[in-house]
Amino acid sequence: MESALKTKWIIDPMHSEVHFKVKHLVISTVTGTFNSFSGSMDSENEDFRGASIEFALDVNSIDTNQGQRDAHLKSADFFDAEQFPKISFKSTSFTKIGDDYQLLGDLTVKNVSKPVKLNVEFGGRATDFYGNDKAGFEVSGQISRKEFGLTWDGITEAGAIVVGDEIKLQINVQFAKQV
């Protein structure tokens, strides 16, 4: 059913999560989380196609379950959280492909904006105990950290690269329809 009115959806942080994975020493994977984030979606269609999506992460909320590593990631070697406290995303298109979507947009890290392509799996819609209309999505993709100015490279004595370039993103979001 088409509607000329835009519907506003806000991310429910209690039922959403942002994870990333990066290779360490090329032999294992480190998983991290951003614990503080916000986002919204404006849609004109019941099936969300063409929706406009914005998202922001608080760099200081990075959590890899290891305090020293988190402090290093917040430092000027990586995210420089003091100077660049937010990572942001603004969509340029949200296209329905079968049951799922392709999300294109601009990701900004450390004042460097680059276009990214993300895959979005639609989890469905449901009404919670309080009568709120919710929509769930699983977003995945990968980016090159070096393209965003995250160029720190450590090399071990044996010549192994400490941190891989490819960052895998896994974001589960639940949006709450605003009335």
Image: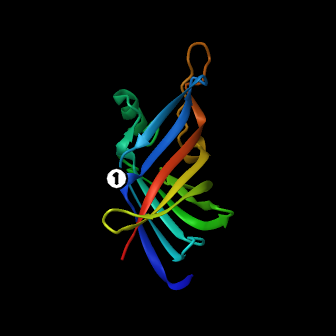
Farthest residue in the front direction? Answer: 129
**Horizontal and vertical percent for residue 22?**
55, 34
Q: Which residue is mark 1?
A: 14
For residue 49, side relative to residue 41 (left or right)? right
Farthest residue in the right direction? Answer: 98
User: Is residue 37 depicted above or below 6 in this figure?
Assistant: above
**Horizontal and vertical percent for residue 45?**
55, 77
Farthest residue in the bottom direction? Answer: 4
What colour scheme has been applied to the protein in the rendered image?
rainbow
> On the image, which quarter does residue 105 sit in?
bottom right
Q: Give the residue displayed 68% in from the left and 63% down from the top.
A: 97
For residue 43, side relative to residue 8 (left or right)? right
Q: Is residue 115 visible?
A: no
Q: Nearer the viewer, residue 17 or 93?
A: 17
> On the image, which quarter does residue 91 sit in?
bottom right
The C terminus: image quadrant = bottom left
Name the amino acid type tagged 1.
Met
Q: Give the residue displayed 55% in from the left and 25% down from the top.
A: 162
